[in-house]
Image (spheres, rainbow, N blue to C red):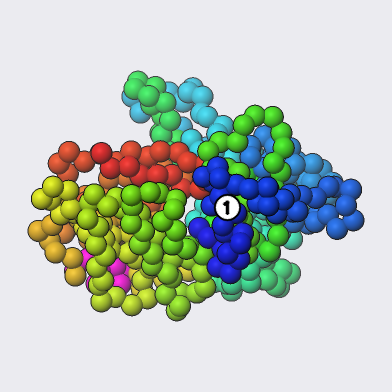
């Protein structure tokens, strides 16, 4: 990830990452330091911390400052031991282990919130979008819907149009209701199948570094203080969060590799794109397919005498499913069937919610197996798919990473 225009800043980031920085580099970074006593301190900007503990503390403090009624909404869930039928097994309170939904959602009118699951990605109601709570429909302590004015007016247009119950009072607000998520917890004889029902929201005055990775923000305040060391990549990611991020080719990051870049097609919007690094030992070659309006990159590598085709894909949440399916089918049909092929990427299709999705069935018919079986994101869903036209000696391992809310898929 590199800045599109500011090459000086881009070079500073490179220097810091490889521990080859100068006094001038440090002076540039220090020029962005600011104290809370400063008259120009950006109090309304998004705060970014390195730990969840700091995020919770900051968000809770802002929530307490609101004068509106505060709701603490507990999750509703059903659980059943798959072997004994008993329901006395304790379920984790960690959202990452319970399908992304939280045990308790604390909210009030005026709260800054973030959507944490995909509700309708084709209309922008996708994980990570932020907004403000403008209304709460409740009967006593029972909350029926939370009305959210999202920062982008393009988010939830369909939901607003269909919101006959709330549209007259909240003209541009999206009614968010409880969502169901099914998951398994425990092991062996204590394995539990559970369904948690909860509002898919979290407070968002502040968030962790990896939660804002890849976002376009006008301004942020990054806290570099606190006890404990930064995990690998955390400080670096926080430093280059700035408006107008774009993938930029830079072969200095990984020596003895070739870097391949594919910018986002203009008809899909500004910024974005894909980048692939491949070892020069694999004789990597880029090849193009006759497909328009799809964000992808195709690469051929050779190990010994075996050729492997690797296709990386990103489907933006705004792309209509039928449009993506048509272009994806076109891509797959252009691939040679007699060569080992790996098709992977962020499909923005949750395989936990839709395990038998049309794309999975289509790929199965062509002899491709989908290898990702556990969540690849910090908030629960399986959005990253890996399709391979062979099931011999192939293992996909998910590895947590602090510089993204998506985890790595490793092929062994």
Instruction: Give x and y (percent) for residue 240.
Output: 60, 55
Is any part of residue 394 visible from this angle? yes
Q: Position of residue 248 (x, y in %)?
A: 47, 63
Quadrant housing the C terminus = top left
The residue at 35%/28% (across/down) is 82
Residue 38 or residue 145, whichever sits in front? 38
Q: Label 1, on which residue?
A: 13
The local secondary structure at tag 1 comes to: helix
Q: Which residue is rendered at x = 33% and y = 49% of the image?
A: 256
Left/right placement of residue 65 relative to residue 106 reads: right
Per the picture, the main secondary structure of the magenta-coloured stretch is helix
Residue 173 belongs to the span the image colors magenta:
no
- Locate residue 316: give its quadrant: bottom left
Tell me if I can see residue 74 in this picture: no
Position of residue 87 measured from the top left corner of the image (x, y, whole percent): 46, 25
Q: Which residues are magenta?
A: 325-333
Q: Residue at x 16, y 59 (%)?
A: 366
Residue situated in front as seen by the camera: 242 or 172: 242
Position of 201 with respect to 194 (left or right) is right
Q: With respect to residue 263, does 14 lie above or below?
A: above
* Among the 4 quarters of the image, the one containing residue 60: top right
- Quarter of the image holding residue 288? bottom left
Side of 40 relative to 373 (left or right): right
x and y percentages locating residue 195 in the rendered image: 47, 39
Number of marks: 1
Could you say which is closer to the camera, residue 335 or residue 60?
335
């Amino acid at each position: 990830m590199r800045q599109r225009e500011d090459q000086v800043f881009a070079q500073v980031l490179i220097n810091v990452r490889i521990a080859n920085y100068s006094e001038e580099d440090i002076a540039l970074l220090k020029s962005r330091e600011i104290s809370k006593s400063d008259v120009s301190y950006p109090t309304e900007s998004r705060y970014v911390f390195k730990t969840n503990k700091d995020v919770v503390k900051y968000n809770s403090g802002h929530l307490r400052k609101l004068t509106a009624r505060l709701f603490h909404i507990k999750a509703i869930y059903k659980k059943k031991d798959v072997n004994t039928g008993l329901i006395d097994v304790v379920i984790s309170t960690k959202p990452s282990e319970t399908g992304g939904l939280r045990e308790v959602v604390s909210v009030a009118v005026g709260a800054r919130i973030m959507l944490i699951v995909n509700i309708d990605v084709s209309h922008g109601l996708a994980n990570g979008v932020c907004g403000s709570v403008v209304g709460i429909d409740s009967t006593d302590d029972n909350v029926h819907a939370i009305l959210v004015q999202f920062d982008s007016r393009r988010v939830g247009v369909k939901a607003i149009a269909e919101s006959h119950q709330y549209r007259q009072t909240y003209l541009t607000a999206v009614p968010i209701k409880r969502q169901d998520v099914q998951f398994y917890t425990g092991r062996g004889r204590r394995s539990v199948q559970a369904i948690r029902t909860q509002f898919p929201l979290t407070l968002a005055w502040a968030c962790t570094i990896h939660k804002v990775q890849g976002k376009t923000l006008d301004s942020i305040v990054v806290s570099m203080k606190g006890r404990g060391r930064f995990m690998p990549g955390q400080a670096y990611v926080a430093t280059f969060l700035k408006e107008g991020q774009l993938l930029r080719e830079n072969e200095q990051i990984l020596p003895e590799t070739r870097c391949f870049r594919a910018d986002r097609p203009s008809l899909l919007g500004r910024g974005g794109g894909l980048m692939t690094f491949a070892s020069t030992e694999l004789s990597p070659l880029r090849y193009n397919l006759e497909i328009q309006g799809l964000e992808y990159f195709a690469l051929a590598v050779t190990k010994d005498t075996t050729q492997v085709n690797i296709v990386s894909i990103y489907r933006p949440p705004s792309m209509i499913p039928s449009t993506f399916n048509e272009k994806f089918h076109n891509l797959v049909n252009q691939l040679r069937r007699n060569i080992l092929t790996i098709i992977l990427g962020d499909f923005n299709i949750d395989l936990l919610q839709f395990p038998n999705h049309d794309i999975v069935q289509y790929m199965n018919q062509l002899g491709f197996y989908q290898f990702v079986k556990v969540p690849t994101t910090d908030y629960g869903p399986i959005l990253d798919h890996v399709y391979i036209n062979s099931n011999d000696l192939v293992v996909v391992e998910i590895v947590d990473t602090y510089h993204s809310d998506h985890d790595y898929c490793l092929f062994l």
